[in-house]
Image (cartoon, rainbow, N blue to C red):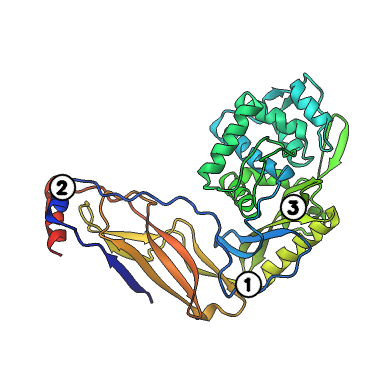
Amino acid sequence: MFSILIRRRACLAAVCLFASLLGAGAQAADSVPLFANPAPGMPVPPELAARAFVLQDLASHQTLAARNADQRVEPASLTKLMTAYLVFQALQSGKLQLTQTLPVSDRAWRVGMSSATRSFLTANSRVPVEDLIKGMIVQSGNDATIALAEGVAGSVETFVEMMNRQAQAFGMKSTTFRNPEGLTAAGHVSTARELSYIATRLITDFPKALPYYGLKDFSYNGVKQANRNLLLWRDPTVDGLQTSYTDSSAYGLVATSKRDMGGAPRRLISVVLGATSPESRANESQKLLNWGHSAFDVIKLFDANQTVTQAPVWKGQASAVRLGRSTPVMVVVPRGQGATLKTTITRQDPLLAPLNKGQTVATLKVTLAGQPWQDVPLVALDAVPSAGWLGRIWDAIRLGIK
């Protein structure tokens, strides 16, 4: 089924070889990449009345459509996706508890009172963390957002530093935050692609966050406010995420939809930026999501933890390692074109122990009708510790004469 393309690296000299006789030789695991551009051959997406957009398929990590995806824009309240990521990170680590209360500082109250989106928090009161989360997500409350930032980091300034460190850890090159809530500030920028990645990491790393984004309304201090994501009322498969607006950025929406496709659930994330009205951002997002669900077939190539191939290992306690993925290997193709899929495997030899379970060591290259379609990293499904010194020397000698 597969042809294996192997690129072998010969030893440069015997001196180099024996200098590394007892060396570990492990390769570092790849970080999760940002979404790539749509592959050539993708169907043409519908025309949207928006400055920029991106549509992602989460199961396959494929970009289905994009326009001006890397154009720097003011993220406005879409900033709160990163704020939420750090809040749920703090909840997971135990730094915050949903039931604990946080103080509403004068700064949080003033930011709320000076902006159009607020949760009507009372200055110098204490509010449960879960209510602040609902205020930030459902009401897009800037006061609730500041209170959470101060509760996580002690100050807004320290929290913003955390946001930017997290953006760097994600590998983002175009995102810089100046505040947690998204008010206009010089240098406060992101892109449609990078915002889609933050949203993806938020709901995959912290799935307990998603139900908050599906809430249609939230009441606090006697004030009931509706979620500004109109798709929550129009499409039962939409369960998030965040709206945005400023004068300079116009209207934006990051939306996610999960639909059952042939017995398997499939989730898409759309980012639509620069729409002309709340109605327009909802309509254009709906158009993009509907197209993404209807124009493609989803094909599972391998199950989670299924052996795709085995690779020889040198200087290890095992002579081979199973390669695959800890999640199913899924590929999205234009409807009706699945029969033209082909796969090959590339890896860089020699593969030296120790190897960690989950370490990226090869690539599954997928082509569609003979054209490059998708690259899927393959990882070691088992750990391979280093062999003893005698085994490492013997393999080094064998490699030197190979």
Frontmost of labels 1 and 2 is 2
Seen in the picture, residue 71 relative to 260 is either above or below; the reply is above
Front position in the image: 149 or 318? 149
Real-space CA distance between mark 1 and mark 2, rounded to the nearest whole angstrom? 53 Å
* Mark 1, residue position: 296
The image quarter in which residue 152 lies: top right
Q: Position of residue 383 (x, y in %)?
A: 32, 50
Front position in the image: 258 or 199? 199
Instruction: Provide the secondary structure element on which disc 1 rests.
Output: strand
Instruction: Provide the secondary structure element on which disc 3 rests.
Output: strand
Residues at marks 3 and 2 touching, judged by CB atoms closer than 8 Å: no
Q: Position of residue 197 (x, y in %)?
A: 60, 51
Q: Of label 1 and label 2, which has the lower sequence position?
A: 2
Residue at the (67%, 25%) spot, across then down: 100
| Residue 19: assigned label | 2
Check the image and name the residue furthest to the top: 124
Q: Position of residue 125 (x, y in %)?
A: 77, 20
Amino acid type indicated by mark 1: Phe
Residue at the (87%, 38%) spot, across then down: 224
Q: Of label 3 and label 2, which has the lower sequence position?
A: 2
Residue 188 appears in the picture as rendered: yes
Amino acid type indicated by mark 3: Leu
Horizontal side of residue 327 vs 351, given as left or right: right
